[in-house]
Amino acid sequence: MAYTMKDVAKRAGVSVATVSRILNGLSGYSEETKKRVNQVIDEMGYQPNAIARGLISKKTRTLAVLLPEVSDLFASEVLAGVEEEAHEKGYSVIICKTAKNGVRTMKYLQTLRENQVDGIIFMSETLTKEYYEAIRKMGASLVLVSTRSDYDIPYVKVDDRQAAYDATSYLVEKGHRSLGMLSGTEGDLIATVPRVAGFKEALCDHGLPAEEHRIAYGDFGFSSGALAMERLLRRVPDVEAVFCASDEMAVGALSLLHRKGIKVPGEISIIGYDNTRAAEMAFPPLTTMAQPLYQMGKKAVDIVLGHRSAESLLLSHQMVERETVGQR
């Protein structure tokens, strides 16, 4: 049987308003009354309704994360940080996996408005005007992760262009002169464009060719990494080192090279991006440019809950050296 607040109040011999105040941590009752009401709640197994409580406290203690169909390993690292920080602060997390056409995103935003979530973490996707207006109308706080927008919304991310530049320069410093790149979705302004820009800029600064045919596009995933590596080998048969826009693409490239009998790093060096668990589990273990994914999730929660200044954060990237890059 599902008990109501009215049932709790009747058994405890107090008003419904008193039960509500106790549940929401408000004042106006004795310690004895509080103990009696909490005892009745335990005995009855009463579960307070978050929406009903929110009508008084203006808080449902729930956060939502909206993320597209991105790399599952990438997302899981960020979400681990989000959930850890949220639960430490007494919040629950709703995860909404959106689609590219925007229809599902708008449906989720309507549902989140009806459920009166306190904050939204918007991840790895473009914040369109339609999304922005819907979130603004619901009054929930908002923070972006691994993306930024033209609106005055705080974000948490790394400098993708600089990270790609540093990864490419690392390969050059190891003596490689014929470089290629496996990139994410062509035209994607969030991750693809800045990483391609960093790759090309590094090559130009080191006096190396930065032709477009040295870039093979995919979708950040394992299968597309293998397919892109196949295309790159046809276009640049003398390629010595490859910068991959994600660890999963890099692992796909490693798989393709293994099937072809091409040694890594003996014949071709490979470097990834993100430092997900895939990088550690790869064979050979993948050298990669690390994003602090777990910390990005934790800091996003701090910002969206107002525990940290609502200013954007550019976090540091760093090289994690393993076994897929050799010295020429």
Image (cartoon, helix red, strand yellow):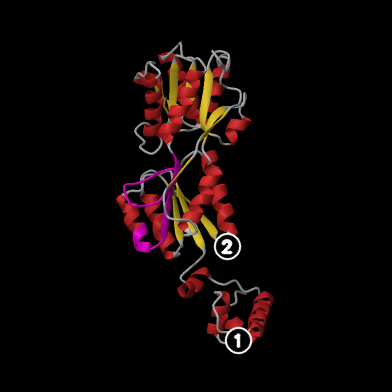
Query: Tag 1 or tag 2, which sits nearer the N-term?
Result: 1
Q: What residue sits 42% from the left and 32% below the top?
A: 162
Which residue is tagged 2? Answer: 90
Look at label 1 and name its amino acid. Answer: Lys
Q: Quadrant of residue 92?
A: bottom right
Q: Position of residue 103 (x, y in %)?
A: 36, 50
Q: Nearer the viewer, mark 2 or mark 1?
A: 2
Question: Pointer 1: residues within 10 angstroms few (<14), some, or many (20+)?
Answer: few
Does residue 5 sit above or below 280 in this rendering?
below
Q: Quadrant of the N terminus?
A: bottom right
Tell me what residue is drawn at x 51 percent, y 73 percent: 53
Q: Is residue 227 visible?
A: no
Which disc is residue 10 wearing? Answer: 1
Where on the picture, by quarter, is residue 287? top right
**Residue lying furthest top in this view?**
238
**Position in image of residue 302 (x %, y %):** 50, 55
Three-letter residue code for mark 2: Gly
Span shown in magenta: 135-158
